[in-house]
Structure formats: structure tokens, C-alpha cells
Image (tube, coloured by chain):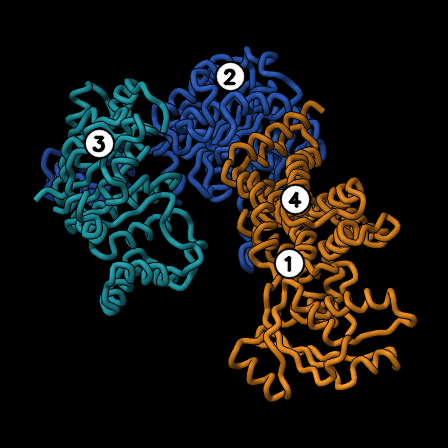
Amino acid sequence: MISVRNISKKYPVGKGELTAVNQLSFDVAPGELFGIIGPDGAGKTSLFRMLATLLLPDGGEALIGGCHVVKDYKQLRKKLGYMPGRFSLYQDLTVEENLRFFATIFHTSIDENYGLIRDIYEQIKPFKDRRAGKLSGGMKQKLALCCALIHRPTVLLLDEPTTGVDAVSRVEFWQMLQGLKSGGITIIVSTPYMDEASLCDRIALMQQGNFLTTGTPDGIKAAFAKPLLAVKADRMHQLVNAVREAPVVEDSYAFGEWAHAVMREEGHDRELESFLSAKGFRQVVVQQTEPTVEDCFLKLMRP
Amino acid sequence: MKQFKAFVRKEFYHILRDRRTLIILLGMPVVQILIFGFALSNEVGNARFVVLDPAQDPATTQIITQLDASRYFDYAGSCRTYREIEERFRREGIKLAVVFPPSFNQELQHLHTAQIQLVTDASDPNTATTLSNYASAVINDYQARTNAVAPLPYTILPVTRMLYNPQLKAAYNFVPGVMAMVLMLVCTMMTAITIVKEKETGTMEVMLVSPVQPLKIVLAKAVPYLLLSLVNVVTILLLSVYALEVPVRGSIPLLLLESGLFIVASLSIGLLISTATGSQQTAMFLSLLGMFLPTVLLSGFMFPIENMPWLLQQVSHIVPAKWFYQVVQSIMIKGKGLDGIWKETGILLGMTVVFLLLSIKNFKIRLA
Amino acid sequence: MKMITAKNLSKVFGGFKAVDAISFEVEPGEIFGFLGANGAGKTTAMRMLCGLSRPSSGEATVAGFDVYRQQEQIKRAIGYMSQKFSLYDDLTITENIRFYAGIYGKPGRFIKEKTSALLRELHLETEADKRVGSLPLGWKQKLAFSVAIFHEPQLVFLDEPTGGVDPITRREFWNLIYAAAEKGITVFVTTHYMDEAEYCNRVSIMVDGRIEALDTPAGLKQHYSAASMNDVFLQLARKATRSAD
């Protein structure tokens, strides 16, 4: 459905230049939910804008549904649903006015494609006469999604749809995406939240213009290849630094209520525990744990 | 077409829902016309004047009587020397002195020409100019009436050139100027700002990805401001006719058509600015500094272009408002028809086409 | 002395109770997590505590000062940093520091000595004269935090300080927070990352203008029999009935 080859984007910065997107290649199958996970400044937005025909790539090319993002941009724009990172609806129009406006400019009407957006729109319908600017973050995102879907696009590009949205709205939003996916729409979504990675069919971890890795969330976790321990003790604030000093440990970082320890080899759990006790930590708990996508990201970020 | 309508409707929502801006846009012409028409008016009433009249013949007496009769001047006695005039200027706040030559009437009768010297207090140059203009007008008036019955026409100097504004109403100059100013502000600045605003909020991104032709987006933006500007033109005309008593001598449809042309010119400048800027502030600065100031300074309505240095005179040629100002002046005050203003109209038309082409060429179908 | 006390603190806009009689206390030196869904009233509550907005009713003191009468003293006693507003992109790092320190009326020598210490700590010595705009986001946020506590306030408010920051920098950021807490600075922080809630000493969760839960992360998880703070948050926030900001 989507095929990207060596796509690049550079921006001039002062005398030098900044490579926002560095020769990325990937494919997305029809009906797939593909996630691009990475922090701000990783180049996600530049990549999305190139796919959305809004930026010209400096190198490489991309085909979406057989349309070339540069040469066939006019046909492609009819097939695309695009939701940019910034909230892009008219704040001074009501919910319904926004939706109707977007329907009209895509040569359709709300009724014609209501089936596709029904589940989402019903949630914001009670507020249909409220101005979009007065909606909460979660509802704005729902409305923006409705507007991006109103012309029944075959490919949906969502640039950070859940940024700044609270945890509840994020869960709801992902449920909506699952619903759309089962309706056959191909979706590319970007997010800075690592925990959302497991909700995608396949993901790419992106950092400084490069993909650190690409694969299914399970595949990426399976490739972690090092034993991972979760550690807890009384003085949590000092724990990470102490764990890092242990010779059996390769890397350590805070992870919620635990500190995660990436071990050099299998089976050194006891050594770590006694090392920490010797350092004066009390109530030390060391247990094996499964790596998450965030663990993988941290590992790949450190050379 | 349906797309276009939806766009225009949306633009109207934007404008109508931003009450404060709307009030400013519609109220601005009213306020400006009233300020310029009344508060800033150069009209002067009941200025006291003295006379140095060694001749004391029938002609001088009549002129003095007429000056005194006008509502602008009050007779404050006569002087015998220049020294005395100067003293009375200083002590009594006399604004004008009229100095006749010793043999005024004789010169008129035999040489058919005579001079009157008007002395004014130039520490306030505006008032001074106005007063000397008014006095000259009264003298001209006297001359016109006596010439009608005289066997041979004669001339009194200084002759003034108040050909089209015999009552010397300041509003005559302001009305066309305010019109140019308001239209420039509404069309250029507002168009530029609303387009750039869509870039800032990210809605332009979504628009560009939609199948709408970019040209439609931009034209739809222009429509409401075109209508709003026409409302402003009508407001200004009604105010000037009924409140300032400045009549429209020429054809009103022609005036509206020419205004329409200037509106389109201003809109296309606004468009051009919006294609070159990315933030609302820059757009506003560009329209204010690049368009509004030249409109005020170089269109000729505040400062006469003839008195400017050569370079500024040349620059004034590329200010669209200058040509529009002349067109409005010609139609409203001089009562000219299209045959009298074809040159200005042609120049405005040419500018509009150039700006439109430039902005369409610069309009990006992508982001960067 | 408690660092923050709030008793039935409320803010009403028209008929809308943005903050509905919240009561809580924050101990000196504590890292206090202030969570809530969009529109739950977090921002409004924080504004009242910073002395930026007058409460409709109730009482509150911050660093011992009353929020009604002593806003100026409060502003001197606190530091503030948010994801949206932090530093001036077109000033250099040193200029930003000097500017903010200047606002709080710190003497020149104090500024000079502390600036070089700070630059060393953040490994930014070589970048001192670079414009802040050219720094990566993560560095900016770390710098912004250091600037917010530059004048050595008793309490610092952090409004979603780590939004969009990469996982490594996020952890480095929290190390700065720990360091500040160890120096005795009280930290009041909001976040959308639930794992960060675990790093706090105590966490409050706001729903519909009220504080629905307040305890240590462990206590909350136990009480709601949840495996993680994320589950706790979802359980509570799903009860929300209002959805406007």
C-alpha cells in the first residue's frame, strides 16, 4: 500500500544543514496500523509532511496506493486523510460546522459517509453546537479524526494525534484506530509515547532522522537479547546510580517504581542483590522482567 | 462551486464571530471620516485682521467690508505702518493683516492689475495658509462680482487657485484620502492576516492536502473582505454627503466601480504579502509599513506631492493609493467622467493584474 | 511548616466549578505529583497556588504566604517552568540565565558564580554563548528547569516538563528533579507520563475539579488493586463526567 525508498529531508541551519529525515525506507501493507515512535525532533513530522505531499523530499521517493507523492500529488490528495500534529480545525466554528465544511471541500456530505465516523462522532455529538476551540483536548482529537475521515480516505496519516491528551482519551483514541483498521483503512500514526507502541501492528523506532529498528512490537522486544532485571530498594533515588556501578550490569535506568538493569549475562541476579546490600540498600528486591518497547528504545539509543 | 460556497460561508463565520474586529472594521471609516471631517479640520473662524490702507478708496473699503462680513474674519481696526502691524500681531493676537498699495483703485482702473499683500502669522503655518487662502478667496469673489459689471476686466493679485473648492472645505481633501486608507487597511491587512493565520494554526496544511484548488482557498478569503469594503465605501460616501456636506459631483456607479478596482488591487497586495510571510505579526507589519504608511504619506492627501523631493515624487507613482486618490477626487469633487480619469484607471488596472499574477505565482501548493 | 496547604480551595467560572473545594498539604522537600485528565482542573488549581489567579473561596498558603494577600511574596518564593513557556530562543544560554536571575534581583557575583557551576553541571560550558533555539528539545527542558530553580526557591512548579522528550533525556530530567529535592526544594509536578507518577513521593489525582485520590504510588496501587499507576489513573479518570477544558 505504502512503499518508501531512501526518502530524505534536509533543512539549512545557519551555515550547515540539519538532516531531519535520513534515507528512510519502509513498506506498509494494506489495512496495517504502522506506528512511528520517537521523541520530538526525531523527524516524524517532516516524514509525515512528505508523505502527505506537503513537503518535497530532497532524495528518495514514496508511493502511496500506487501514487507518487511528488508527481501524482493531486490524485493522492483525494485518497489521503491527514491529521497534522497541531490542532488544525477552525476554533471559531462549531463542531458540526467544522465537519460539514470538511465534507464539502472533499465533495461529499456528512450523511454520505456517516457510517464510517458514526462511532466516533456519536461521542462528540452532544457538543455539536459548541465551538471547536472550547472542546477538551480529547474531544478536539476526535473531531479532527472525524474531519480527516469524512471523505473515506484509503490511507490515514496521523501525526502525533495523542500528544498532550490525557491517558483516558489516549486509550479511547487507540480503540477508535483499531475500529478503523478493521474497516480496512491503512493507518500510519506517530507518537512520542512508548507505551502506545504495543497497539500497532508494526512499529519503527525513530531518533534523529533514522529508524533505530523496524518490526512488530513483539519482534522488537524479542530482539532485546539481554537479560533484564527489575530492582527495587528503600532509597530509590540513589538506586539507579548504584546499580550502574555493579560490574555485572551493562546499563540501568529508572522505570516507574522499578529500576531496570540490563545485565551483561544471564544468571547474575544474586550477585546484583548482594552488591546492592553491600552498598547499604535495604529491602532490595531483584526480579526478572520482560523488556518493553521503551527498554528497546533506550538500548538502541545508547550505542 | 459548492466547495467555494462552503469556503465563503466559513470566512463569514470567522468574521462575524470575531465581534471586536468586525466592529473595528466597520467603525473605522466612520471614526476616521468624523475625525478628519470635524476634529482635524483646518477651518478657522472669526480670525481678527487689521488693515494698512493708505489709499482708502472705494475699492479697498469694499474689500475690507467683505472680509469683515465673511464668517472667517473680524475687522480689528487699521494700522498706519508695518511696525504697528507687527506690534499688534504680538500684543493682540491678530492673525492677518491686509496691506493695500497707496494707489490701489487707480492701478486697478488704469493698469487693470493691482496687488494686495496678505500678512499672516506663520508660526502656525497651517492656520496661516488657510487664512491667506480664505482671504484670497474673498478678494477673488469681490473681483468676480465687480468684473461682471466693469467695462474692462481687471485682476487683483495674488490670484488663488481654489478652482474646485470655493468654500475651502477641508473635508474635500480628506474624504478621498480616508477612502483609500480604509480600503487599504481592510483589504490588504485583513486578507494577509487571515491567510497567514491558517498557516499558523495548521489548517492550511489540511486544506492543501484536500482536493480544493489552492486558488479557490485564496479567492474565497477575498470575497467577504470585498463585500465588507464595499459597505465601507458606501458608509464613507453617505457620511461625507450627509454629515460633511461634500457632494458627489460625478457618477456614483463610476465611483463604485473604481472603488471596486482599488479593492481588488488591495486584496491582491494582501495576497502577495501572505504568500511571503509565515506569521501574523510579520504580515501585519508588512501591510502597515509597506502599504498603509505610503498610502497616508505619498498619496497626496495629507502632504502635497508637488512639494516633495524628486525621489519621493517618483516613489509615489508606484503607490496605488495615489492613483485611486486622484480618481476619487476627480469623480467626487471635479465631477469628471471616465474620459477624464482613463490614465489613472489604466495604471490601477495594470497594478492589479501584476499583483494578482505575482501572488498566484508565489502561492505554494506545498509547505516549504 | 507545610510548603503548601489548601483547604476547600475553589475556583468558579460563571456556574462552572473548575476547581471544587480541594484540600491537601505538601511537605517541604517532597516531590508531589499532580495528575488529572485534560479539563480536570489541574491548570486552574496550579494558577491559584502560583498567585496568578484569585480563588473563589477556600484557603491556601504557599511557602507560608497567603494566596489572597501575599501573591508577591509567593512569586519570590517559587520557581515555575512549563513545557510551553520556558526560555527565550533568541537569547544565548548565559543571557537567559542572567535575565531570569535578574528578575529575582540576585546580585551579580551570585549570578556569575552560579552560572558557571550550572553550565558545568549540565555539560554546557562550550555551548554557553549559543542561542537556546539551536539546542535540542531535551537540553532546553533541562536548562529551563535549572533556570527555574536558579534563584533557589523553596518550591518549584513544573507543568508537564517532559512532554515529547526522548526516554533518556526524560530520565536525566528526573535526576535533576531528585537533585533539587535533595537540596530541599519542594517539587510540584504535572505529567501525562504515568511511569513518572511512580517517581513522585506522593501523587494526587484530580477528577472533575476534585481530588479523588492522594497517596504514595504504592498506596494508590494497593488501594485500587492496580498493577501500575496507569491502571489507577484510568480507573479514576473514567469516572469523569465532564469533558470540557
Instruction: Give percent across and percent down for residue B83.
Output: 60, 89
Of the two numbered discs 2 and 3 in the rendering, the one whose residue sits closer to the viewer: 3
Lower position in the chain sequence, tag 4 or tag 1: 4
Q: Are marks 2 and 4 on the same chain?
A: no
Three-letter amino acid code at the position of disc 1 = Val
- Residue B296, which numbered label? 1
Q: Compute the Cα span from label 4 to label 1.
A: 25 Å
Residue with the mark numbered 3: C10
Residue with the mark numbered 2: A180
Chain name for mark 4: B
Chain name for mark 2: A
Farthest-out residue, right? B151
Q: Residues within 10 Å of mark 3 (few under 14, many from 20)?
A: many
Q: Are marks 1 and 2 on the same chain?
A: no
Would residue A171 be seen by someone viewing this image from the given angle? Answer: yes
- Residue C7, which numbered label? none
Question: Could you tell me if the residues under marks 2 and 3 are in contact, i.e. CB atoms within 8 Å?
Answer: no
Chain name for mark 3: C
Helix, strand, or loop for circle 2?
A: helix
The residue shown at (54%, 76%) is: B93
The residue shown at (30%, 20%) is: C240
Q: Which chain is cyan?
A: C
The residue shown at (64%, 49%) is: B244
Residue nearest the viewer, comparing C142 with A106: A106
Q: Which chain is orange?
A: B
Tell me the colour chain A is drawn in. blue
Of the two numbered discs 1 and 2 in the rendering, the one whose residue sits closer to the viewer: 1
Helix, strand, or loop for circle 4?
A: helix
**Quadrant of the drawing holding the C terminus of chain A:** top left
